[in-house]
Image (cartoon, rainbow, N blue to C red):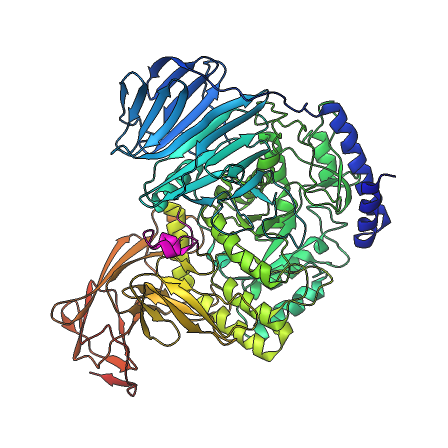
């Protein structure tokens, strides 16, 4: 037996027993044999380039460049988005893409100019220059500055393709998906090949679960984006091989990329998501706290878990059912011994305010008595090798076949299985192991890349098949199944594997991390990287999936997780319990405090989600998005912004009771104390175990709700507007939080402007737009940072009948107003605490 097989056998016997280990060895041997039979030969020789340009032809909104050895199409999608394709013939039919969502763009205005050595295409936003001898391409600002220039440019060798561009020294490099690294990708060579790195993946693990070939180049006065639209196995080399060059490579397929002209980082993200689609607003309950564990294995366990959360007054909205609930790990089943009456259990959990989410794996056990396998075989839904035999690989239930999610027929078949779960009472779906990931006890094991895929009728193979889009299309099928069953509800799907555009279908998480401080640090940078790649609704398994966190690590991770988009604790079978009460009373109380803070901030988080859904901006953002001109912010990934107004400085080192952080320009309030701090400098923040430093930008309005144990626990009678005195603008979004009424205009945007007037008064202007009317009619306004008892409070010119002043905070209850004025001085640290007494 080969040494590699012995290692696999040993690992498998340790982890899952002899039978699973033998299946893993058999699978690896089968793949080796198939590789010998079907794998492509290794390309040899030099890469070819197009050569000298012979002719240039304008076709409507495209320029067709005929060079010595290739044709290049430069197609204007919009004034800011340009698509470039290279082929060896001139047949540029409209391309098929799983990444691209929108194809109906109004024709842009363009000006083509042939000046001899080059041809330029100019729009109102960007200039694209085709150099003729030899063919090379550059993108320039309208005033002639080079933004993105070819090095070697486009090239090919046999079935391989490549595009190489210059990488200026001053360029910062962001995006490329959920990378387990810093946010600056410069100096890295990353794989584009979805793979399971297994629990405990190291920093810079590569490949990893997602492949999102979207890059943002940030230069001091210009940002731009590139989408390499090829899902084949590939690489992006960001100055790793040559410090001054960047290359996109793929083993096969068409050379096609999109250029996004920016010029700001925010504009690039808006342009990218306008092309690839944006996150659809999730149900409000999905923004609450989620609890999961591999090992919750019976009806009684879930009933006890729900009882503990409610008795301990720990807010929670979602409970997850990992593979333990299944009958022999078969998707679309449940164990009727341990979960005797699943619909009754889920109904009882729903009455207590818990939504239930079920895990689904794509592997369908090859069991002739298994209904899902029976229908899948009858309807011919499973992936095949080139010889027509079905792909078989071991997963949790044993040997499995895998649906071909690149087929519309197969996606519809998968969606038809969803009622098995929704009719039982499951509210959401958790797509796992969908790189796809056979169990072979080796990092990165997946299906061979010569597996044949339908490709929605195109019959593609030998381009990595549908590998990199597999997880995304499984999420699409799961979402479509939920939509069909519950057309009046918002679907909730979470996927481990993803490709560019997956944000249209699902949220994601950072995979099987480990209970270490290194993984705590990685979890933040991975969430930031995902957000800069269009996947904004994401978060880590708090506390680590594998391993046992000590109380300090757990609560520091919990504090961070409470401010991330996806807020979930999850852990592996065999580890210590990870529930908030498992670490003692002190940790439980700190966790309760941050749970309650999250639930108070739900309307603020929901506004950030709405901004993401409408504009494509991340929910949590690196500080460079706050002030791109500040060089100190460009590499920071240990602090972040939630939305536009809240800055979070998590504690990422053991034993730390304080930390240094660089505050961006402007004036900031410490959330806990109300103390004012000037930015553009490094400050030291106190951070005892119970405190994570949080800062609010002066001049912003933070909407808040009363604490609830779950979303919708009780009617909200009064909503809070906490105003931090200063000059600034805030946008706030409202809708019902569930259902699709918002798509029919049932929503409301509020626009706040805060400022100090020459008279010394502090003014709040409130403009509203939209049809939605919230169920509550009263607001409580709390203005932080008013240094003296106001002489009066004016609401639309009329004196307020009553207000309170205490410790620098003015408070009053109101109906919606157009302008409020506080006749007093603000913008100074409160210097005294006054008794809470009404002023009439």
Query: Is residue 54 left or right of 584 when viewed as pictured?
Result: left
Picture coordinates of residue 405, whole percent (x, y): 61, 34
Q: Is residue 735 visible?
A: no
Quadrant the C terminus occupies: bottom left
Residue at the left extreme? 759
Start and end of the magenta stretch? 617-635
Q: Is residue 810 above or below residue 38?
A: below
Using the image as rendered, state which of residue 188 and residue 244 is in the foreground: 244
Q: In the image, is residue 112 above or below residue 599?
A: above
Which residue is situated farthest in the bottom direction here?
A: 835
Q: Residue at x 27, y 18 (%)?
A: 115
Q: Nearer the viewer, residue 730 or 839?
A: 730
Q: Position of residue 398 (x, y in %)?
A: 78, 44
Q: In the picture, residue 484 is in which quadrant?
A: top right
* Residue 288 seen in render: yes
Question: Residue 531: horizontal and vertical position, in percent?
Answer: 46, 49
Quarter of the image for residue 8 reads: top right
């Amino acid at each position: 037996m080969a040494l590699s097989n012995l290692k696999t056998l040993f690992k498998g016997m340790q982890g899952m027993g002899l039978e699973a280990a033998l299946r893993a060895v058999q699978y690896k041997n089968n793949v080796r044999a198939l590789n010998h039979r079907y794998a492509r030969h290794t390309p040899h020789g030099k890469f070819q380039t197009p050569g000298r340009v012979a002719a240039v032809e304008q076709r409507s909104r495209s320029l067709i460049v005929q060079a010595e050895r290739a044709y290049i199409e430069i197609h204007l999608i919009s004034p800011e988005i340009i698509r470039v394709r290279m082929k060896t013939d001139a047949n540029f039919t409209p391309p098929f893409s799983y990444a691209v969502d929108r194809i109906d763009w109004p024709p842009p205005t363009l000006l083509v100019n042939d000046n001899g050595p080059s041809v330029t295409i100019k729009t109102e936003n960007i200039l694209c220059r085709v150099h003729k001898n030899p063919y090379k391409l550059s993108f320039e600002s309208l005033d002639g500055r080079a933004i993105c220039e070819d090095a070697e440019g486009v090239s090919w060798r046999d079935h391989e393709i490549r595009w190489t561009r210059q990488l200026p020294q001053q360029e910062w490099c962001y995006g490329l998906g959920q990378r387990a690294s810093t946010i600056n990708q410069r100096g890295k060579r990353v794989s584009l090949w979805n793979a399971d790195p297994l629990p405990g993946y190291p920093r810079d693990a590569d490949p990893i679960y997602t492949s999102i070939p979207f890059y943002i180049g940030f230069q001091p006065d210009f940002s731009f984006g590139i989408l390499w639209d090829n899902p084949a196995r590939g690489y992006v080399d960001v100055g790793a091989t040559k410090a001054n060059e960047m290359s996109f490579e793929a083993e096969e397929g068409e050379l096609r990329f999109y250029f996004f002209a920016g010029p700001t980082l925010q504009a690039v993200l808006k342009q990218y998501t306008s092309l690839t689609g944006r996150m659809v607003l999730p149900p409000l309950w999905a923004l609450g706290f989620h609890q999961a564990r591999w090992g919750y294995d019976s009806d009684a366990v879930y009933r006890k878990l729900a009882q503990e959360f409610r008795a301990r007054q720990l807010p929670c909205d979602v409970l997850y059912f990992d593979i333990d609930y299944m009958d022999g790990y078969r998707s679309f089943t449940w164990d009727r011994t341990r979960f005797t009456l699943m619909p009754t259990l889920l109904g009882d959990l729903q009455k207590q305010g818990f939504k239930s989410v079920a895990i689904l794996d794509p592997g369908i056990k090859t069991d002739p008595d298994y209904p899902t396998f029976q229908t899948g075989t009858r309807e011919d839904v499973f992936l095949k090798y080139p010889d027509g035999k079905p792909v078989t690989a071991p997963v949790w239930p044993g040997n499995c076949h895998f649906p071909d999610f690149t087929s519309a027929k197969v996606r519809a078949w998968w969606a038809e299985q969803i009622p098995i779960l929704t009719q039982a009472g499951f509210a959401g779906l958790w797509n796992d192991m969908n790189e796809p990931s056979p169990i072979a006890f080796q990092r990165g094991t997946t299906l061979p890349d010569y597996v044949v895929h339908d490709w929605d009728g195109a019959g593609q193979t030998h381009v990595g098949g549908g590998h990199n889009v597999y997880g995304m299309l499984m999420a699409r099928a799961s979402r479509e199944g939920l939509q069909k069953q519950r057309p009046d509800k918002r679907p909730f799907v979470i996927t481990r594997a993803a490709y560019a555009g997956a944000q249209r279908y699902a949220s994601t998480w950072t995979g099987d991390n480990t209970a270490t401080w290194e993984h705590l640090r990685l979890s933040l940078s991975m969430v930031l990287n995902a957000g800069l790649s269009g996947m904004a609704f994401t978060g880590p398994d708090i506390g680590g999936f594998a391993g046992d966190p000590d109380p300090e690590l757990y609560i520091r991770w919990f504090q961070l997780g409470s401010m991330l988009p996806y807020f979930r604790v999850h852990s592996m079978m065999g580890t210590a319990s990870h529930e908030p009460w498992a670490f003692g009373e002190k940790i439980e109380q700190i966790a309760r405090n941050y749970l309650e803070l999250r639930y108070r901030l739900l309307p603020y988080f929901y506004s950030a989600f709405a901004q993401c859904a409408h504009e494509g901006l991340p929910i949590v953002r690196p500080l460079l998005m706050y002030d791109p001109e500040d060089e100190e912010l460009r590499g920071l990934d240990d602090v972040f912004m939630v939305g536009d107004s809240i800055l979070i400085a998590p504690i990422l080192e053991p034993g730390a009771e304080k930390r240094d952080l660089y505050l961006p320009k402007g004036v900031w309030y410490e959330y806990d104390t109300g103390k004012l701090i000037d930015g553009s400098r490094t400050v030291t923040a106190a951070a005892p175990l119970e405190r994570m430093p949080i800062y609010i930008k002066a001049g912003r309005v933070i909407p808040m709700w009363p604490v609830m144990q779950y979303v919708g626990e009780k009617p909200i009678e009064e909503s809070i507007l906490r105003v931090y005195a200063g000059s600034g603008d805030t946008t706030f979004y409202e809708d019902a939080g569930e259902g699709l009424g918002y798509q029919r205009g049932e929503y409301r945007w509020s626009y706040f402007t805060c400022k100090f007037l020459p008279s010394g008064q502090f003014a709040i202007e409130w403009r509203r737009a939209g049809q939605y009317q919230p169920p509550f009619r009263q607001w409580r306004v709390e203005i932080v940072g008013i240094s003296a008892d106001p002489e009066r409070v004016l609401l639309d010119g009329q004196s307020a009948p009553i207000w309170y002043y205490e410790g620098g905070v003015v408070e009053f209850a109101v109906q919606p107003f157009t302008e409020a004025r506080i006749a007093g001085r603000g913008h100074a640290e409160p210097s005294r605490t006054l008794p809470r007494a009404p002023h009439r």
